[in-house]
Image (spheres, rainbow, N blue to C red):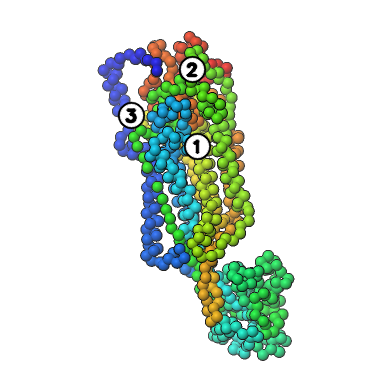
């Protein structure tokens, strides 16, 4: 290190500097509200509150409701209410999950930000650290405790959406039922017989006839009848009588007022696996079940039920139009059930969380490993690109770098690995959202439930990765953009944006670390919406199937299934594609100014740009900046240096006074 000849200060000058420093010293109150500390503390508080809410909710549920099949059912009733409540719960869950993910990412950036001591240690080993961006690169040099906390946050962040989105799910109720073709005589108590005895059918027919005679069944006109029963899940109705005219010849000739009986069972069971629940509505010989059995094909004025694989042998042929239906209404039994799970740091030696923090540190104490290299960029120090460690070696006197100028696009701030990872994950989400999905394992054991959860929530992990990679790429590009605003030709000059600004100075702190709010908020909102859409695109669901017993009653069995919403998938594809295209467009179209080397997040390049001029105004040697410089409005450019007149080599650095732009083909050191 070169020696510096510093004139002695008078007593008055010393007192003045002491008073000025005292004014710049933050109070305990202002320190508690420092930007990064306040944000990390807010995140820890938010995490603690959410964890507390989860614990209280779980305790109340266990105390009030019974746990069945590894879940707790806390609502049974109207299916629309259950569905809207589940959607609302998923919105809240995704908002809170994304908030925690954002706070977690913020905390990881702070934990991974090196202190000045750690930067010096890395530079002494010819290794640069990342400033202002969340990265795994720094873990080699930051303290073990911070590395451990960083890894814990990293590992715990991804399951937030993956597990939490499945803690609340809907159980749809659906009834098996009989669709019975009968004459009006049956509804009035007429005789009936079955060609093939069935204990359960007998019991149901007796109860339906009794209810019809007491007007307990709901009359439905033909169109309404078809619309109500043309569904895969029947949650608010059970058996239905299809009333045909008594005057039909077959009905008149028969001694039975009951004709065909269609048994509607869910296709997931062993019975009649090829037939849809509503297969009796159409003639399976004329339609492809589930595909062409649509309302457009029906003649409501002359509708006759079709044949069915599950029909009981008819007493007489059903080839006569249905006049109306008598339907047994049932209480809806849709449920909302819950699985529960949940998770959330700060210290002396302040971390260099932002580019401004690093500039302030290097202006206060210049780095000894990067002298005489004021034009060195991140690319120069990147060992994979430079192929050597030349930039770390002492530079001989009278040598320097030639400024060639040039403007680079924003993509210059992004590493090729970041770009490839983001492209791969975004393409994966788009491809999975547009592809087919098979129904998952429909069994009730715990492993089946866990498999269903894994299938439905793996896309959530991908979206979380998209957010973290997107945030990392935005941070890198925006940190580089902010660095370039200090160039000599940029106006007006700005104070350093640091994580802990000193009150009463030009320092500032308004961003979410390195990301301006106008970028951070839209990205968080977009990712929240994408998380919610993915939770609606592929989701875990239970079906409570009410099966007919031999006595004509119902037994309920539960099946766990995975479903896909094509509409939510389409929206997910559109949003993921828009995010991808927008980022690519920004990275490839916007350019950085040409009057400053692209240091970005590279600690060595930032340190090289923060080397003092070699002489004071009185031409005495110096090795430090004015101690007040970090608190003033600054610019980076060529400073007046008497040494330039001696060897013809210029020098550029930060200054609050007159600076000029770099000159092309001029040598600087």
Give the left or right position of residue 279, taking residue 5 as reference.
Answer: right
| Mark 1 / mark 2, whichever is N-terminal | 2
User: Of label 3 and label 2, which has the lower sequence position?
Assistant: 3
- Residue 324 position, x and y percent, is 64, 79
For disc 3, the marked residue is: 24
Label 2: state its secondary structure.
loop
Q: From the viewer's side, name the closer residue of 589 and 351.
A: 351
Q: Secondary structure at mark 3?
A: helix
- Residue occupied by mark 1: 475
Task: Give the class, few, some or many, for how many residues have Cα within 10 Å of label 1's Cα (few <14, many ≥20).
Answer: many
Image quarter of the N terminus: top left
* Residue contact at pointers 3 and 2, CB within 8 angstroms: no
Give the labeled residue for mark 2. 395
In the picture shown, does residue 158 fall above or below 74? above
Picture layout, residue 331 above or below residue 336 = below
Q: How many marks?
A: 3
Q: Along the horizontal axis of the image, is 148 left or right of 268?
A: left
Residue 19: image quadrant is top left
Give the x, y percent position of residue 248. Answer: 71, 85
Q: State how far apart marks 3 and 2 are (Cα).
A: 37 Å
Residue situated in front as seen by the camera: 605 or 330:
605
Res. 104 visible in picture? no
96 w.r.t. 331: above or below: above
Where residue 187 sits: x, y (%)?
60, 85
């Amino acid at each position: 290190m070169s020696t510096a000849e510093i004139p002695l200060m008078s007593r008055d000058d010393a007192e003045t500097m002491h008073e000025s420093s005292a004014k710049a010293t933050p109070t305990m109150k202002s320190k508690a509200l420092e930007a990064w500390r306040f944000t990390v503390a807010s995140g820890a508080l938010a995490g603690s509150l959410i964890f507390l809410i989860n614990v209280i909710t779980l305790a109340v549920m266990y105390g009030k409701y019974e746990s069945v099949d590894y879940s707790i059912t806390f609502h049974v009733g109207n299916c629309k209410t259950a569905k809207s409540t589940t959607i609302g719960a998923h919105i809240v869950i995704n908002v809170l999950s994304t908030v925690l993910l954002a706070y977690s990412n913020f905390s990881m950036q702070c934990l991974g930000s090196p202190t000045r001591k750690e930067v010096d240690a890395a530079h002494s080993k010819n290794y640069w650290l990342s400033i202002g961006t969340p990265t795994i690169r720094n873990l080699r040099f930051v303290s073990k405790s911070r590395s451990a906390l960083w890894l814990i946050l990293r590992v715990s962040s991804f399951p937030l959406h993956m597990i939490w989105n499945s803690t609340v799910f809907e159980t749809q109720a659906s009834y098996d039922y009989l669709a019975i073709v009968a004459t009006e005589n049956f509804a009035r108590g007429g005789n009936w017989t079955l060609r093939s005895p069935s204990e359960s059918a007998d019991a149901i027919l007796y109860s339906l006839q009794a209810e019809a005679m007491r007007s307990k069944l709901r009359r439905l006109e033909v169109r309404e009848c078809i619309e109500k029963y043309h569904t895969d899940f029947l949650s608010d109705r059970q058996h239905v009588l299809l009333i045909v005219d008594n005057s039909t010849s077959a009905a008149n000739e028969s001694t039975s007022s009951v004709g065909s009986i269609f048994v509607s069972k869910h296709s997931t069971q062993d019975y009649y696996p090829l037939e849809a629940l509503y297969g009796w509505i159409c003639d399976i010989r004329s339609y492809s079940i589930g595909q062409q059995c649509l309302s457009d094909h029906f003649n409501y004025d002359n509708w006759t039920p079709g044949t069915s694989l599950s029909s009981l042998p008819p007493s007489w042929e059903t080839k006569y139009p249905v006049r109306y239906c008598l339907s047994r209404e049932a209480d809806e039994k849709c449920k909302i059930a819950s699985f529960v799970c949940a998770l959330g740091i700060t210290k002396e030696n302040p971390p260099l969380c932002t580019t401004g923090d690093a500039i302030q540190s290097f202006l206060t104490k210049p780095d000894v490993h990067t002298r005489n290299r004021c034009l060195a960029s991140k690319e120069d120090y990147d060992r994979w690109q430079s192929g050597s460690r030349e930039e770390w070696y002492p530079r001989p006197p009278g040598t320097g770098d030639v400024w060639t100028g040039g403007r680079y696009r924003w993509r210059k701030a992004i590493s090729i690995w970041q770009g490839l990872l983001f492209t791969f994950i975004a393409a994966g989400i788009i491809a999975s959202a547009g592809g087919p999905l098979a129904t998952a394992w429909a069994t009730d054991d715990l492993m089946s439930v866990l498999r269903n959860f894994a299938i439905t929530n793996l896309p959530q992990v991908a979206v979380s990765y998209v957010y973290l990679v997107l945030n990392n790429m935005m941070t890198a590009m925006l940190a580089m953009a902010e660095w370039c605003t200090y160039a000599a030709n940029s106006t007006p000059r700005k104070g350093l944006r640091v994580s802990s600004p000193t009150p009463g100075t030009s320092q500032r702190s308004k961003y979410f670390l390195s990301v301006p709010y106008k970028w951070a908020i839209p990205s968080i909102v977009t990712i929240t919406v994408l998380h919610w859409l993915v939770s609606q695109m592929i989701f875990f669901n239970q079906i409570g199937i009410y099966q007919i017993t031999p006595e004509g009653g119902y037994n309920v069995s539960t099946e766990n299934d995975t479903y896909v919403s094509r509409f939510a998938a389409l929206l997910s594809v559109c949003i993921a594609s828009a995010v991808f295209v927008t980022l690519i467009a920004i990275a490839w179209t916007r350019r950085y100014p040409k009057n400053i080397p692209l240091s970005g997040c590279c600690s060595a390049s930032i340190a090289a740009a923060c080397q003092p001029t070699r002489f004071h105004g009185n031409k005495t040697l110096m090795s430090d900046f004015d101690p007040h410089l970090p608190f003033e409005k600054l610019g980076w450019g060529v400073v007046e240096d008497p040494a330039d007149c001696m060897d013809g080599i210029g020098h550029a650095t930060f200054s609050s006074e007159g600076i000029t732009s770099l000159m092309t083909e001029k040598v600087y050191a």
